[in-house]
């Protein structure tokens, strides 16, 4: 029996790796200077730590250090990228393109721009039941680009269904038309091999707390090679980071971010293989123990045109017919930490917009659980999770058969 509760919600956040905590600690109590302070050793040490970390993060994604802009997290990075491009005084038009299955941190800034008169096109994806469910065909992007398109924003890997998008092909299409490309890579960086030069993106958002680093620190890659991307700042103040993002730098967070990403890159091949194996075992166990379940998102064996997997290694999103996801969480008695498709965010009581965008009914969307396997999960926990979910599903279905109220 593993230690309880078992945590399998690593798409929401991850436990900070003890090696990351160790790297951060001196910058709370010993080297606690402000990186913006000049003329004394405390500020010099903080500034050196920031620039060293910036270089480490840049190297991990094949960027230049000057192209890494620190933020409070991927939500801020997404806002700065999208609104920063749209609000530049000298832009080519008012049209932006994205995808219906994007995170709210992309969709909400776009909706805000739409209320101000910008034109937004949201593209459809492959529908539920397709082996490539959730995947965005590059031709859809090509067909949507207009002469007045200023930005295309497509996430690298989806936070709910794990689908990996063909960013390299999309970026190539955009480059032909002179359109900037933003990629929310929050779920991809540290879990996949990510190279900004190879992807061809102009802007890329990512965050530390998805890769076993601290919360409250993220980054935005901003391409500087000519012609460089120009952004309108969203936060004004002391002029830090070339005026693009003012505010005192979070030195301990930045150091932890760099260490977390370094560990992910060093351990990536072995960790990907381990997570693929555990994810496959979990899916097989669920299938063998529970009737009438469906996979949400691409098939585990689905590949892209280059033969790479179309799904994040640790992601599994499953619908349990005629069982409400929230009720299923309650029936497990807090033994297992996973996410329900009954709500795509804590502030939104409706079913997941991602699952609805796949063409799933509201009832089916509400019957889902998302499993996010990560570094600290074990095969023993996978077996426990499958048994716990199966027992709870049987309990709820038996209750319905005995005359209980149907939940979907």
Image (cartoon, rainbow, N blue to C red):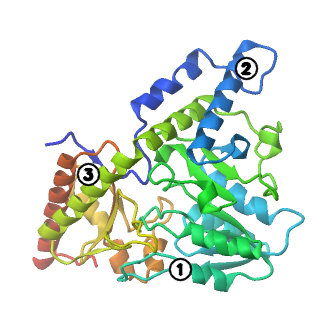
Front one among 320 and 314? 314
Binning the other alpha carbons within 10 Å of mark 2 as few (below 14), some (14 to 19) or many (20 upward) gives some
**Marks 3 and 2, Cα distance to the nearest angstrom?**
44 Å
**Marks 1 and 3, Cα distance to the nearest angstrom?**
35 Å
Label tally: 3
Q: Residue at x 46, y 28 (%)?
A: 21
Side of 28 relative to 191 (left or right): right
Q: Position of residue 383 (x, y in %)?
A: 16, 53
**Marks 2 and 1, Cα distance to the nearest angstrom?**
49 Å
Side of 15 relative to 197 (left or right): left
Q: Position of residue 303 (x, y in %)?
A: 39, 72
Residue 8 shows in this picture: no
Q: Position of residue 312 (x, y in %)?
A: 40, 60
Binning the other alpha carbons within 10 Å of mark 3 as few (below 14), some (14 to 19) or many (20 upward) gives many
Of the residues tagged 1 and 3, which is closer to the observer?
A: 1
Of the residues tagged 3 and 2, which is closer to the observer?
A: 2
Dot 1 falls on a residue whose secondary structure is loop
Q: Which badge, 3 or 2, is on the more N-terminal residue?
A: 2
Q: Residue at x 23, y 65 (%)?
A: 283
In this figure, which residue is indicated by the disc labeled 1? 137
Residue 43 has which mark?
2
- Does the CB distance between marks 2 and 1 fall below 8 Å? no
Q: Which badge, 1 or 3, is on the more N-terminal residue?
A: 1
Binning the other alpha carbons within 10 Å of mark 1 as few (below 14), some (14 to 19) or many (20 upward) gives some
Residue 263 has which mark?
none
Q: Residue at x 49, y 56 (%)?
A: 188
In this figure, which residue is indicated by the disc labeled 3? 336
Extreme residue in the bottom direction: 143
Report the quarter where the N terminus lies.
top left
């Amino acid at each position: 029996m593993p230690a309880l509760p078992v945590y399998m919600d690593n798409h929401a956040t991850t436990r900070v790796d003890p090696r990351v905590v160790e790297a951060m600690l001196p910058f709370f109590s010993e080297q606690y200077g402000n990186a913006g302070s000049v003329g004394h050793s405390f500020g010099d040490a903080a500034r050196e730590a920031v620039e060293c970390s910036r270089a480490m993060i840049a190297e991990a994604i094949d960027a230049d250090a000057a192209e890494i802009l620190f933020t409070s997290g991927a939500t801020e990075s997404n806002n700065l990228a999208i609104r920063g491009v749209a609000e530049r005084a000298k832009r080519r038009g008012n049209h932006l393109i994205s995808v219906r299955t994007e995170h709210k941190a992309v969709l909400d800034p776009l909706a805000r721009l739409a209320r101000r008169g910008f034109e937004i096109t949201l593209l459809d994806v492959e529908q539920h039941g397709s082996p490539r469910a959730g995947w965005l065909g590059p031709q859809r992007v090509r067909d949507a680009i207009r002469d007045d398109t200023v930005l295309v924003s497509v996430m690298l890997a989806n936070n709910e269904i794990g689908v990996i998008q063909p960013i390299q092909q999309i970026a190539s299409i955009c480059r032909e038309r002179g359109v900037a490309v933003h990629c929310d890579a929050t779920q991809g960086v540290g879990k996949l091999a990510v190279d900004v030069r190879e992807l061809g993106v102009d802007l890329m958002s990512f965050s530390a707390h998805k890769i076993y680093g601290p919360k409250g620190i993220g980054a935005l890659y901003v391409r500087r090679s000519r012609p460089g991307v120009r952004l309108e700042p969203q936060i004004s103040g002391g002029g830090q980071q070339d005026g693009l993002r003012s505010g005192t730098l979070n030195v301990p967070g930045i150091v932890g971010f760099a260490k977390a990403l370094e560990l992910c890159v060093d351990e990536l091949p072995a960790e990907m293989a381990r997570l693929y194996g555990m994810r496959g075992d979990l899916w097989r166990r669920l299938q063998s123990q529970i009737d009438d379940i469906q996979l949400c998102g691409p098939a585990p064996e689905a590949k892209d045109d280059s033969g790479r997997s179309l799904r994040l290694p640790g992601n599994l999103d499953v619908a349990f017919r005629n069982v409400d996801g929230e009720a299923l969480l309650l029936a497990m008695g807090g033994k297992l930490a996973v996410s329900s498709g009954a709500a795509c965010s804590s502030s939104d009581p409706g079913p997941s917009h991602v699952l609805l965008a796949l063409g799933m009914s509201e009832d089916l969307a509400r019957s889902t659980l998302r499993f996010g396997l990560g570094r600290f999960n074990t095969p023993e926990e996978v077996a426990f999770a499958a048994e716990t979910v199966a027992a709870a599903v049987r309990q709820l279905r038996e209750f319905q058969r005995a005359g209980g109220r149907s939940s979907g």
